Image: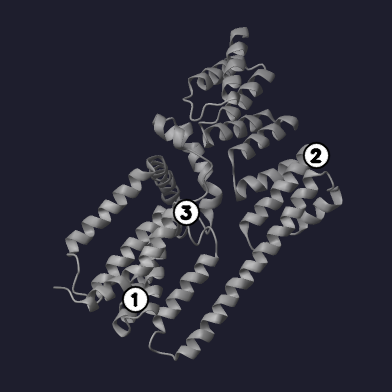
């Protein structure tokens, strides 16, 4: 017979994983749901509670949870497998030194373009492809960007994390310890399946804060621990304020650009400001500059801004724009290269294939236009729409006229 004391202990352990699991379910985050389940079993095994599942039963439950998470959003899961497969090619480029910090963010779409241009892919893979800039696994990303030697610091990270949580649970079995351990384990496990730190640096501050709290359990008085946390929370608040102020600045710039209030002087001033804390804001800046110069037909400056944008955060439409700009500059060889990059980077889009088709028609490349048009007509439809129907009709009529 299990005593009330044991039931209370189990409920204490289950409380925070249950809350995280509920929130993860509401926000459709399978990664954090799996992290919450893992944290529950880990802490349960480390506790003094008598009601514990066997190790094999726990492993089976975790495997079942991963399987259910995989099946729940099967296309998303298969999409991540495709991303792992393509990004592995980035690792092979320089397995020792890596491709450079934040390299995946700017280079993944180029790798995807190369993958689909080689034509060794399934129809399912073609339909799953999208504008992607993350690999949905923080540890895999770190190895790709910094090389195989990154496995050494990662090993120490997991070793000291495990040691810190074990020590904290040995010292205290109270709500604070359970909360810190649950949150820390959840983030570590979730980072195997989604983006945390690479998406927002605040996650890094949170992880550091949790870790430092865990290792200081039993070492400092509660008063010092509270002061320590207030300090770290102030760091998070400062980062958030800075982020929101910068975001507001760019929203104002966007509104100015959309209303036609920007001048050449404003844009030149923007070009000189390069030290933004977030890559996303640098991307927004380059988008505004690229749009401005393209709309005002200043093709040389438009090419420079759009090329920089494609290196920082490429999209299939950015490659299309580079193709259009090169065509206006009279460089048809480069124009064709960029139009093809637009097609193969996200090969299920009809609009970019139409642009390549029209490019061949305008340059009287009849055979290439036919080939491109027939490929467009054979393309499986991911989401049917009026635009897709109209594009297919237009291409059919044009091919009949050739």
Measured in 3D between alpha carbons, the distance from the residue under mark 2 to the one under mark 1, in whole angstroms, is 58 Å
Front residue of 41/395: it is 41
Image coordinates of residue 250 in percent, x first then y, are 72, 55
Q: Quadrant of residue 333?
A: top right
Q: Which residue is mark 2?
A: 298
Q: How many numbered circles are shown?
A: 3
Q: Are marks 2 and 1 in contact (CB under 8 Å)?
A: no
User: In the drawing, does residue 189 fall left or right of residue 248?
Assistant: left
Q: Is residue 139 visible?
A: no
Q: Which is more foreground, mark 3 or mark 2?
A: 3
Question: Could you tell me how far apart the alpha carbons at marks 1 and 3 are, in whole angstroms?
Answer: 27 Å
Question: The residue tagged with tag 3: helix, strand or loop?
Answer: loop
On the image, the x and y values in percent for residue 172 come to: 33, 83
Left or right of 322: which side holds 3? left
Residue at image position (72%, 41%) is 303
N-terminal of the pair, mark 1 or mark 3, is 3
Cβ atoms at labels 1 and 3 below 8 Å apart? no
Disc 2 crowd rating (10 Å Cα; few below 14, some 14-19, many 20+) is few
Q: Which mark is residue 27?
A: 3
Asked which secondary structure carries label 1, the reply is helix
Q: Residue at x 61, y 72 (%)?
A: 237
Cα separation, mark 3 vs mark 2, equals 44 Å
Quadrant of the snapshot with the N terminus: bottom left
- Mark 2 or mark 1, which is nearer to you? 1
Residue picked out by circle 1: 165
Q: Is residue 253 above or below residue 324?
A: below
Looking at the rendered image, the quarter that the C terminus falls into is top right
Of the image marks 2 and 1, the number of the one nearer the N terminus: 1
Q: Is residue 275 above or below residue 10?
A: above
């Amino acid at each position: 017979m299990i005593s009330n004391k044991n039931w209370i202990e189990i409920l204490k352990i289950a409380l925070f994983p249950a809350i995280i699991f509920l929130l993860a379910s509401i926000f459709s985050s399978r990664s954090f749901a799996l992290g919450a389940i893992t944290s529950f079993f880990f802490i349960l095994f480390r506790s003094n509670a008598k009601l514990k599942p066997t190790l094999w039963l726990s492993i089976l439950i975790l495997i079942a949870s991963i399987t259910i998470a995989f099946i729940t959003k099967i296309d998303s899961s298969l999409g991540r497998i495709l991303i792992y497969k393509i990004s592995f090619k980035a690792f092979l480029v320089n397995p020792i030194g890596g491709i450079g910090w934040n390299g995946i963010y700017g280079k993944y779409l180029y790798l995807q373009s190369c993958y689909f241009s080689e034509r060794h892919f399934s129809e399912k893979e073609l339909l799953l492809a999208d504008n992607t800039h993350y690999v949905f696994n923080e540890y895999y990303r770190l190895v790709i960007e910094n090389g195989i030697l990154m496995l050494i610091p990662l090993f120490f990270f997991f070793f000291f994390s495990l040691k810190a949580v074990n020590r904290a649970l040995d010292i205290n079995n109270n709500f604070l310890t359970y909360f810190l351990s649950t949150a820390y384990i959840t983030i570590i496990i979730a980072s195997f399946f989604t983006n945390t730190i690479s998406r927002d640096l605040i996650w890094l501050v949170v992880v550091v804060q949790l870790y430092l709290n865990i290792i200081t359990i039993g070492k400092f008085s509660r008063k010092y621990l509270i002061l320590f946390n207030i300090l770290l929370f102030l760091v998070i608040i400062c980062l958030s304020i800075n982020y929101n102020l910068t975001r507001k600045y760019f929203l104002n710039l966007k509104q100015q650009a959309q209303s036609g209030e920007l001048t050449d002087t404003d844009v030149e001033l923007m070009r000189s400001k390069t030290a933004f804390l977030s890559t996303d804001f640098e991307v927004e800046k380059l988008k505004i500059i690229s749009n401005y110069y393209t709309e005002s037909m200043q093709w040389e400056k438009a090419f420079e801004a759009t090329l920089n944008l494609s290196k920082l955060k490429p999209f299939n439409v950015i490659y299309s724009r580079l193709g259009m700009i090169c065509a206006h500059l009279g460089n048809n060889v480069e124009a064709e290269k960029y139009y093809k990059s637009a097609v193969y980077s996200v090969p299920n889009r009809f609009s970019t294939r139409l642009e390549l088709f029209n490019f061949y028609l305008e340059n009287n490349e009849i055979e290439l236009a036919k080939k491109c048009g027939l490929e467009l007509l054979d393309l499986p439809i991911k989401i049917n729409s009026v635009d897709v129907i109209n594009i297919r009709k237009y291409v059919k009529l044009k091919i009949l006229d050739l």
